[in-house]
Image (cartoon, rainbow, N blue to C red):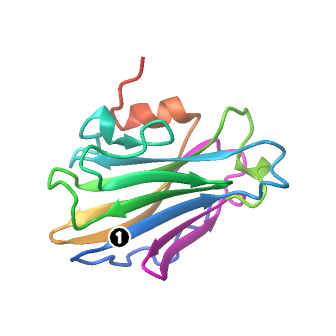
Amino acid sequence: MAIDMTRDRRRKPGAGRDRVTVTVGVDADASLGYDADMSGYALDRDGKVISNQHFVYFNNAVTPDGTVGFSKQDSEQTLTIDLAGMDPQVAQVAVAVTVYDAAVGFGRVPGARITVRRGGEVLADYNLNSGMPNARSVVYGRLARESDTWKFWAEGTEYPDLVATVASFGVTTS
């Protein structure tokens, strides 16, 4: 069964001083110790990170220009994306979620969801447990620059783990 990622597929965050937030949360009481980790990637037109510092996650909380930032509070993680201040080299911002340090998929992480918002408006909201219960790392969507506007595109590309996900975006690891 494929994950349903069709809701608001072509909504335009628009031009101007826009901030988009992407939040991932889990039911901490029922998660059996499993956690979902979010990561963001500021990408060029070829789909590769501008630099390794444009891979944003818990150990690298902000891009060099400050336009993509990561924060965590309890069992909730948030990427804040400043579209208006984005470096012109950045053509896309991809968002991935990985089950942290476990050989299980999202089906074993109760209450896991990802929500994309602009202001108070929900652009996309997905239950991570359904559709791809055995997936351990998934790129759920991208904000893509088209002329002077940004659009959110649902994706759903599955990878075996975080290492494969970051490699697909050209991040070099040691």
In the picture, measured across the screen, residue 66 lies left or right of residue 75, that is left
Could you say whether the residue bearing mark 1 is in a helix, strand or loop? strand
Q: Residue at x 78, y 54 (%)?
A: 28
Numbered label tally: 1
Q: Residue furthest front?
A: 73
Task: Answer whether residue 59 is visible to the viewer in this image.
Answer: yes
Task: Answer whether residue 2 is visible to the viewer in this image.
Answer: no
- Judging depth in this view, the residue of 13 and 136 nearest the camera is 13
Q: Residue at x 31, y 48 (%)?
A: 42
Residue 120 x/y as whole percent: 48, 82
Magenta residues, start to end: 113-139
Image quarter of residue 4: bottom right
Image quarter of residue 63: top left
Residue 1 x/y as whole percent: 69, 58
In the picture, measured across the screen, residue 101 lies left or right of residue 51, that is right
Residue 35: in magenta span: no
Q: Residue at x 37, y 40 (%)?
A: 55
In the displayed structure, would residue 35 be above or below residue 110?
above
Residue 151 x/y as whole percent: 32, 70
Q: Residue furthest top?
A: 174
In the displayed structure, would residue 39 be above or below residue 153?
above
Q: Residues within 10 Å of mark 1 (few under 14, many from 20)?
A: some
Amino acid type, label 1: Arg
Q: Which residue is mark 1?
A: 19
Q: Residue at x 26, y 43 (%)?
A: 64
Residue 127: in magenta span: yes
